[in-house]
Image (cartoon, grey):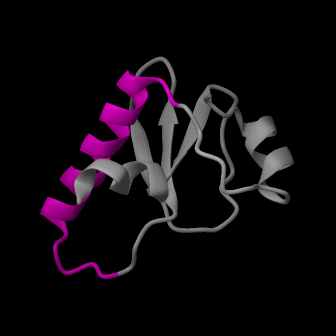
């Protein structure tokens, strides 16, 4: 499931630990964004909360706040989904 900005904000307050199903291409793009950031900035020790990614262009940015503000075409990929294949 891909969260739009309104869905994420609505479900953020009462999230459960159920796994989210994301579009595989979005998940790959989000992991690539995270990996690239980590390779360019290895001295950064703060773990991101997730990645905000555009559903159409697959461009994104790391989010370090607990309540991300997303544009209508963006979705949020939480760090728990990113690290599933990293380790």
| Residue 33 or residue 86, whichever sits in front | 86
Q: Position of residue 25 (x, y in %)?
A: 36, 23
The residue located at (44%, 66%) in the rendering is: 48
The residue located at (19%, 69%) in the rendering is: 41
Image quarter hosting the N terminus: top right
Q: Position of residue 9 (x, y in %)?
A: 80, 48
Q: Position of residue 76 (x, y in %)?
A: 57, 43
The residue located at (51%, 30%) in the rendering is: 22
| Residue 48 or residue 73, whichever sits in front | 48
Asked if residue 42 is among those painted magenta in the image, a careful observer would answer: yes
Q: Is residue 30 toward the left or the right of residue 20 in the image? A: left
Q: Is residue 28 toward the left or the right of residue 48 in the image? A: left
**Magenta-colored span:** 22-45
In the image, residue 55 above or below residue 82:
above
In the image, residue 3 above or below residue 11:
above
> Of helix, strand and loop, which mostly describes the magenta segment?
helix
Q: Is residue 87 toward the left or the right of residue 81 in the image? A: left
Using the rendered view, name the quadrant where residue 3 is placed.
top right
Q: Position of residue 27 (x, y in %)?
A: 39, 34
Residue extending furthest top?
56
Q: Is residue 31 toward the left or the right of residue 49 in the image? A: left
Image quarter hosting the C terminus: bottom left
């Amino acid at each position: 499931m891909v969260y739009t900005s309104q869905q994420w904000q609505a479900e953020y307050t009462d999230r459960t630990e159920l796994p989210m199903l994301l579009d595989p291409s979005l998940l790959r793009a989000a992991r690539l964004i995270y990996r690239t950031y980590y390779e360019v900035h290895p001295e950064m020790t703060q773990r991101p909360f997730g990645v905000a990614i555009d559903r159409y262009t697959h461009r994104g940015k790391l989010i370090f706040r607990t309540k991300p503000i997303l544009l209508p075409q963006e979705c949020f990929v939480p760090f728990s989904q990113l690290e599933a294949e990293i380790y």
